[in-house]
Amino acid sequence: MMIPKKILKITATIFLSLFLIYKFLLSDFNPIFKSEEFVYLNNALKASQKENLKSITDIYKKIHEKAGDKRCSCEVSTRYIGPYRHGYSLTKKLYLLKIDKEFTEEQCLKFELLNTDFKYGNIGIKSASKFYFNKTVDQLNEVEKITFVAMLNNATLYNPIRNKEGLSNRVRLYQLILHKKKL
């Protein structure tokens, strides 16, 4: 049985139209990418690349890779901008697709480390490392870096001041995961 040429043409036209719409939605011509918040996020992501946080991002990636955690730092970075209604929208999805297209996961992770609220007025890992350990980021030892990896997932739950035992348990777990040999 042959498919009529007319149905084939209509199907091809629909797929081509959908493809062109998708390309437009992620292109720089789409006006939502000119919004003040998105431009700020884009510039902040680019600016965060100047920071040397490789030692912490490496630990983060190893732990989450071995634990099988699929948390997306690019998705987290889009939470810093609107729209805020209901936590999810088509606009948010387009922002995420554009960020995923232009930045790597590691670049988004750097942005997240530099902009996360580590509690007590400490925004970013630089001020948090000074506050919690009285050290610069470069001076942190492995346990202190793992502490920030745990806090990145939930700064309230793994707070070094309010929940020392819970944080200690999480740091030990992450150390086991980090140093576990693959079979």
Image (tube, rainbow, N blue to C red):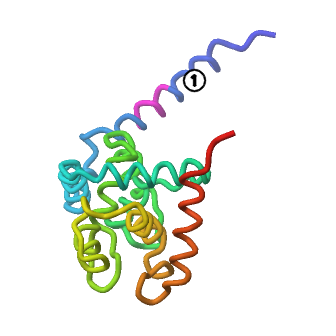
Residue indicated by mark 1: 10
Q: Secondary structure at mark 1?
A: helix
Residue closest to the far top: 2
Q: Quadrant of the C terminus?
A: top right
Q: Nearer the viewer, residue 107 or 126?
A: 126
Location of residue 99 in the rendering, given as x and y in whole percent from the top left corner: 34, 47
Q: How many marks?
A: 1
Residue at image coords 29%, 67%? 125
Q: Position of residue 130 (x, y in %)?
A: 23, 75
Residue 167 forms part of the magenta stretch? no
Instruction: Decide: few, some or many residues near mark 1? Use Cα within 10 Å; few <14, some 14-19, many ≥20.
Output: few
Closest to the observer, 183 or 96: 183
Q: Is residue 133 above or below residue 91?
A: below
- Quarter of image, res 41: bottom left
Farthest residue to the bottom: give it: 162
The residue lying at 21 percent from left, 53 percent from top is: 51
- Up/down of 28 relative to 177, above or below: above
Q: Is residue 18 magenta?
A: yes
Q: Amino acid at mark 1?
A: Ile
Q: Quadrant of the N terminus?
A: top right
Q: Residue at position x 42%, y 55% from top?
A: 73
Query: What secondary structure characterizes most of the magenta part?
Result: helix
Q: Is residue 68 left or right of residue 93?
A: right
Classify 25 as above or below 132: above
Residue 94: x and y in percent read: 40, 50
**Residue 28 horizontal/vertical position (percent):** 25, 40
In the rendered image, the vertical position of residue 70 relative to residue 161, given as above or below: above
| Displayed quadrant of residue 29 | top left
Q: In the rendered structure, which segment of residues is drawn in magenta?
A: 16-21
